[in-house]
Amino acid sequence: MTLYLSRLTLQTDQQSRALSGLIDPPERAHAQGRGQVLDAHHRLIWSAFADSPDRERDFLWRSEGQGRFMTLSSRKPVESPLFETPEVLPFAPSLAAGDRLGFALRVNATKDRSRVDGPNRRVDVVMDALHGLPGSEDDSRPRASARLTLAAQAGTEWMARQGTVHGFEPLEIAVEDYRVMALPGYRGRRKGQPQFGILDLAGVLRVSDPATFIARLGSGFGRAKAFGCGLMLIRRV
């Protein structure tokens, strides 16, 4: 299957600037606000791919900031009045076992947590690690101070598991950020609202099974792909 890697850049004309607060709202400090930003971006990207009312999402995307987005898709993005002409390249990396690649990945990393009173429950790997910290839910100080340390450990372990299944070996991993988003569209009290975590990972990996790895690149990593997660960018090092 042919894939396309595209860069989409928001128009900067006067009309687009007037709508910028709606289509590309500024980052917010709290989880609910960040979730609203992701929801706005998700709808914005759809304008370049929704060519029919019943179209289902068949693309990955991530925000690069300042009105720029990267997408990986099986179809070329269409012209949209909200974007400049898309920059599109075929995505068909020629890889061999042993190749070293730099990577950047924004991901909602999850795992199954076993339960004695029912079926396994899928949980965010960092939230699960934070859940085990001492202290009450009302005392955020231990959680805040340990968040990035636990994120680095949980993210490294998650990447190792992904590599075992998907044809690569992580050699260097850095956790550049971890933030929590409220599920867009949720209505109800803020306390207890559904949330998910987003890890920004970067580093170096070695390809062990090129076909398996390329297939996973096309389908994306982790969950929450509708909200800008799962697209791994790669480059040779």
Image: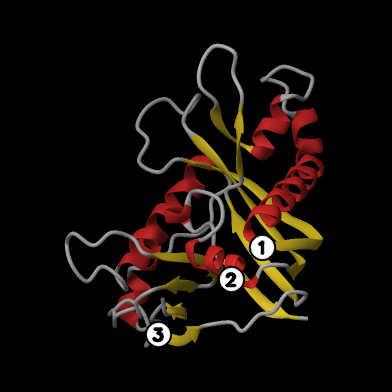
Could you say where residue 53 lies in the image, as x and y percent from the top left? 17, 62
The answer to which of 229 and 183 lies nearer the viewer is: 229
Q: Are marks 1 and 3 in contact (CB under 8 Å)?
A: no
Q: Which residue is mark 2?
A: 211
* Disc 2 residue type (three-letter): Ala
- Vertical comparison of 124 with 7: above or below: above
Q: How is the image coloured?
A: secondary structure
Among numbered discs 2 and 1, the one appearing first in the sequence:
1
* Disc 1 residue type (three-letter): Gly
Query: Which quadrant of the figure has residue 184?
Result: top left
Q: Which residue is mark 3?
A: 86
* Disc 3 residue type (three-letter): Pro
Residue at point 54%, 27% (across, down): 121
Within-10-Å neighbours for mark 1: few <14, some 14–19, many 20+: some
Residue at point 44%, 86% (across, down): 88
Among numbered discs 2 and 3, the one appearing first in the sequence:
3
Which secondary structure lies at badge 3? loop
Residue at point 77%, 45% (across, down): 148
Q: Which residue is mark 1?
A: 167
Query: Which quadrant of the figure has residue 50?
Result: bottom left
Among numbered discs 1 and 3, the one appearing first in the sequence:
3
The answer to which of 36 and 156 lies nearer the viewer is: 156
Residue at mark 2 to residue at mark 3: CA–CA distance? 28 Å
Could you say where residue 191 lies in the image, as x and y percent from the top left? 50, 24
Q: Is residue 50 toward the left or the right of residue 83 in the image?
A: left
Residue at mark 1 to residue at mark 3: CA–CA distance? 31 Å
- Residue 130, which numbered label? none
